[in-house]
Image (tube, rainbow, N blue to C red):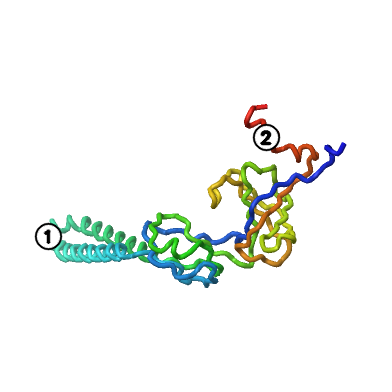
Amino acid sequence: FAAFIPVPMSSLAPAEIVAAEPALITAPLDGVIQDVSIAPGTLVAKDQILLTFNDTKLKSDAEVARRNKEVAQARYFRVVQTATANQKESENLAIAKAELDVATAELSMAEHLLARAVIRAPRPGLAIYSAKSDWIGKPVHTGERIMDIGDPEKTELRIDMPVSDAISLSAGGSVALFLDGDPLTAIEGTITRIGYRPVLSADRQLVYRVHARIAGDTPRRIGLRGIARASNGDVPLWFYLLRRPIASLRQRFGL
């Protein structure tokens, strides 16, 4: 009879306090990062410089585009001045105007790329990334994630549930977090969303990302780590104890 006693179906997984809805800082262009202006964990203000790209080639491209525009503009003015007296020059007026428009567009693009070589904070918050040495001198591609800007007053719990330990979870399920620095105190939370496809974690393991809202109004420090117990509903005791052996037998022998 004890085998049919209902017990909570739960699973343990590594967890971390992360920023809720952080602003993502990604590479706006292909290039090499020249300098990172702020250290990890620094509180930054809006529009504060975060990092700069090596802009030697961008400056050169902008200068070439500026000279090309000057040449096209001088050619266009010459054609305009002589078009009234020379029928042949009047036929070239449209061509000269088109060349000037192209040169203007190329200069605008070159200046736009040069301006993007300096990345500023889109909002105030905490700079979250690994280390300066990981990024200075590193070539990056457009769209590559570099850092996050998170609000330290808005945090949530992220659980990396290994595929082998994954159980059926849904939004609204309960979570208990045991921090590494305080393993005797449980921090309660509620599951808000679940990743339906596994992703690679930092230690190169396939995990499901589970996010939970922490109970209470006091925000927790970003970066705190621990073990989370996620549960969702009750199952008979026999199933709780034999779930893994049954799964192993099915995977190995197809029983």
Count the marks.
2
Is any atom of residue 203 visible in this view?
A: yes
Instruction: Estimate how packed mark 2 is, as few (under 14), some (14 to 19) or many (20 or more) residues with alpha carbons within 10 Å.
Output: few
Give whichever of 134, 188 is nearer the camera.
134
Residue 77, image quadrant: bottom left
Give the Cα separation between the discs numbered 2 and 1. 89 Å
User: Which numbered disc covers residue 66?
Assistant: none
Q: Residue 242: horizontal and vertical position, in percent?
A: 74, 37
Give whichever of 219, 103 is nearer the camera.
219
Asked if disc 2 and disc 1 are in contact, CB closer than 8 Å, the reply is no
Label 2 residue SS: helix
User: Which numbered disc covers residue 247?
Assistant: 2
Q: Which residue lies under the disc numbered 1?
A: 86
Quadrant position of the N terminus in the picture = top right
Label 1 residue SS: loop
Residue visible at 24% across and 63% down in the picture: 64
Instruction: Estimate how packed mark 1 is, as few (under 14), some (14 to 19) or many (20 or more) residues with alpha carbons within 10 Å.
Output: few
Is any atom of residue 117 visible in this view?
A: no
Residue 19, image quadrant: bottom right
Q: Residue 22: horizontal and vertical position, in percent?
A: 56, 61
Residue visible at 53% across and 70% down in the picture: 42
Q: Residue 109: horizontal and vertical position, in percent?
A: 34, 60
Residue visible at 70% across and 59% down in the picture: 214
In the visual, does 172 lie left or right of 51? Answer: right
- Of callouts 2 and 1, which one flags the residue occurring earlier in the amino acid sequence? 1
Q: Residue 35: horizontal and vertical position, in percent?
A: 40, 67
Q: Is residue 174 above or below residue 242?
A: below
Quadrant position of the C terminus in the picture = top right
- What amino acid type should be assigned to the residue bearing mark 1? Asn
